[in-house]
Amino acid sequence: MVSSRLRLSALAGVVALALAGCGQAAAEDTGADADSSSTIDIEDNNGTQTVVSPPTSVVATDNRTFETLDAWDIELSAAAVSLMSEDLSYTKDDSVLDLGSHREPDLEKIVEAKPDLVINGQRFAQFHDDLAKLAPEATVLELDPRDGEDFGSELKRQTTVLGEVFGKQDEAKKIIDDYDASVKRAKAAYDSSDTAMGLITSAGDIGYSAPSTGRTVGPVFDALGLSPALEVEASSEDHQGDDISVEAIADSKPDLMVVMDRDASFAPEERDEGSAPAAEVLEDSEALKDVPAIKDDKIVYFPQDTYLNEGIQTYTEFYNSFADKLEEQK
């Protein structure tokens, strides 16, 4: 009996040690996996960034990312809520601290948010260093479209990187596929013999958005290969477009107009004095009544929230509207 008990005791000890060793190894393996999956290295506009994935506290200031983050149900601890379109859920969530607008920012609120990730850009790009100082433990990620790069590719790059950060790779691919399909439709619908003009209306005035470089509208010329009806020297990226007379528009006789109504993004009480819908400004103009684009109803308007969005979904919607408008006239 004693011998049997000793043998059983010894066997139990061996099993216990083996189980302990396995448990320790499993714990070490789990810890190693957790460590290796807790951060990822990605490239943004400023180089390689190490990002916690998924992040636990996210701050967002880049308008182009808001719709994507909202669609993916990403919780935000703070954001430039004042610059968001009203249809986003964040505007109705009191738990999201509002950093204000780029004109009157309340950057100190980021301290309360304690972020490990700040998605910064567009109107808030100028505050990169301030945000980094106020949230030293956070990674400040910037994915604005870069100068000299294809605009559409840059929108897709932004979406792809965000998908990697939040584990939404499939969702990111769907957004990009929808964008590519809309561009393909728009290209097929466009008659290359038609000349086009990009315009921005603001406070009842008409501004010119130059091909390639003009605010919001300009990149459409490159994406679709539009033939400009007019090219102006020393054009800018001004948010209201460059000065242009209705006579210059009429004389250039554009067959097609691509238009952003800047004021449409704001509530009526927030609009500048003299504001009027873009369709009214252009289509009711006596000076423009003989312009082919107006006579033939070939004006394509950007979505109403474009000025506060300008993200990949905005362009997808626009390109589909562009295709719809031109396909129905064929």
Image (tube, helix red, strand yellow):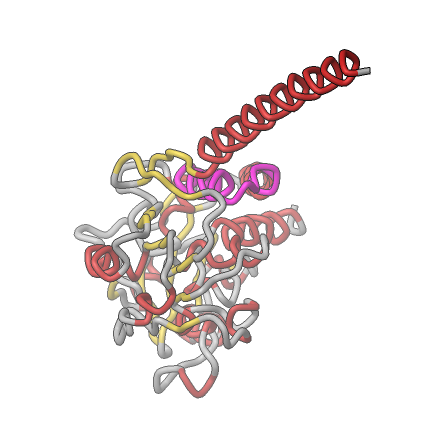
Residue furthest toward the right?
A: 1
x 49%, y 66%: residue = 305
Question: Can residue 151 be seen here?
Answer: yes
Main SS class of the magenta portion in the image = helix
The image shows residue 283, relative to residue 150, as above or below, that is below
x 27%, y 71%: residue = 108
x 47%, y 84%: residue = 268
As rendered, which of 123 and 226 lies closer to the eye? Answer: 123
Question: Can residue 224 be seen here?
Answer: no
As rendered, which of 231 and 80 lies closer to the eye? Answer: 80
Choose top left, top right, bottom left or bottom right for residue 169. Answer: top right
Say how many tags the image has: 0
Q: Magenta stretch containing residue 79, yes or no?
A: no
Is residue 148 found left or right of 169 in the rendered image? left
Image coords of residue 125 (percent x, y): 26, 56
Choose top left, top right, bottom left or bottom right for residue 258. Answer: bottom left
x 25%, y 59%: residue = 131
Quadrant where the image shows the C terminus: top right
Image coords of residue 72 (percent x, y): 58, 52
Image coords of residue 154 (percent x, y): 39, 40
The image shows residue 91, relative to residue 25, as above or below, that is below
Quadrant where the image shows the N terminus: top right
Q: Magenta stretch containing residue 169, yes or no?
A: yes
Residue furthest toward the front?
A: 2
Image coords of residue 226 (percent x, y): 43, 42
As rendered, which of 131 and 268 lies closer to the eye? Answer: 131
Residue furthest toward the left?
A: 234
Is residue 249 found left or right of 298 in the rendered image? left
Looking at the rendering, the stretch of residues picked out in magenta corresponds to: 152-174
